[in-house]
Image (spheres, helix red, strand yellow):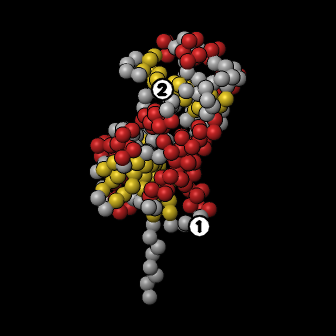
Amino acid sequence: MAIKEEKQYKFGLVGKDISYSFSRGYFSDKFKNMGLSNYSYVNFDLKSINKFPEITENSNSISGLNVTIPYKEVVIPFLQSLDADAEKIGAVNTIKITENGLKGYNTDTYGFKHTILPFLKEHHTKALILGTGGASKAIAYVFKELGIEYTFVSRSSGEKKITYKELTKNTFKEYSVIVNCTPLGTHPNIKEKPALPYSFINEKHLLFDLIYNPEKTAFLLAGEAQGAAICNGQKMLELQAEKAWEIWNS
């Protein structure tokens, strides 16, 4: 009698230059600890988002996907539908394979909200969001939910957006939460950090870095040296990964 082969479940991360990937290590360990020997997680390192359809042409071989920098926004046209929150945010980091095609979700919001909440104090009423990519949109969405005013900091100015050169002492008196959504400081370039006037930061500030490797980035170290509260992206990534797992299995 022929032995029936166990069905294989493959998940993966879509991004660019993602050999450092948190997700692959996290889910590989998760599957091992759960005894799911027929589950695997791989990196889809794409030089261009136009290669994305090659991954999903045979969606029977893929059970779920995560999306990271720089494709959280540009992946949307390749999807058949969006969750309501992902549509409002305009960025996707989780894709579910459904009967009606690929559906995009955003679990960054869940991860960020539940990580930053314990750190927020009454005077944390305004936030600077460093960067304007897909991750920063999720952060802005959470701040809007929490009633925290925010301004993006970028290399160019615009609506709700100022440049790094426009940051003054008064800016830091007004904005007491600073979130780094840029890749500056990620291993191995651990000496890099956003170009802020760190001398204006004090014990009333909270610095949050979406980066988790290293544990304390140059951005966080500079804030800590000024007495600020700090938090990295480790717990946020764990929470968004678990929320993605929940979505894939719902």
Q: Which residue is mark 1?
A: 35
For the C terminus, which image quadrant?
bottom left
Q: Residue at x 39, y 51 (%)?
A: 95
The secondary structure type at the circle numbered 1 is loop
Q: Is residue 32 left or right of residue 166?
A: right
Q: Quadrant of residue 112?
A: top right
Q: Is residue 50 left or right of residue 13?
A: left
The secondary structure type at the circle numbered 2 is strand
Q: Are marks 2 and 1 in contact (CB under 8 Å)?
A: no
First in sequence, mark 2 or 1: give its number: 1
Q: Nearer the viewer, residue 172 or 91?
A: 172
Q: Quadrant of residue 9?
A: bottom left
Q: Which residue is mark 2?
A: 150
> How many angstroms separate mark 2 from mark 1 (CA)?
44 Å
Q: Residue furthest bottom?
A: 1
> Tag 1: Cα neighbours inside 10 Å, few (<14), some, or many (≥20)?
few
Above or below for 102 versus 202: below
Q: Quadrant of residue 56?
A: bottom left
Give how far across and how far down residue 69 sits, in percent: 45, 37
Give how far across and how far down residue 218 sits, in percent: 63, 26
Above or below for 94 versus 116: below
- Identify which amino acid the numbered label 1 is placed on: Gly
Give how far across and how far down residue 92 sits, in percent: 40, 43
For the N terminus, which image quadrant?
bottom left
Give how far across and how far down residue 203 sits, in percent: 69, 22
Q: Say if residue 59 shows up in the picture.
A: yes
Q: Say if residue 214 shows up in the picture.
A: no
Q: Residue at x 50, y 52 (%)?
A: 243
Q: Nearer the viewer, mark 2 or mark 1?
A: 2
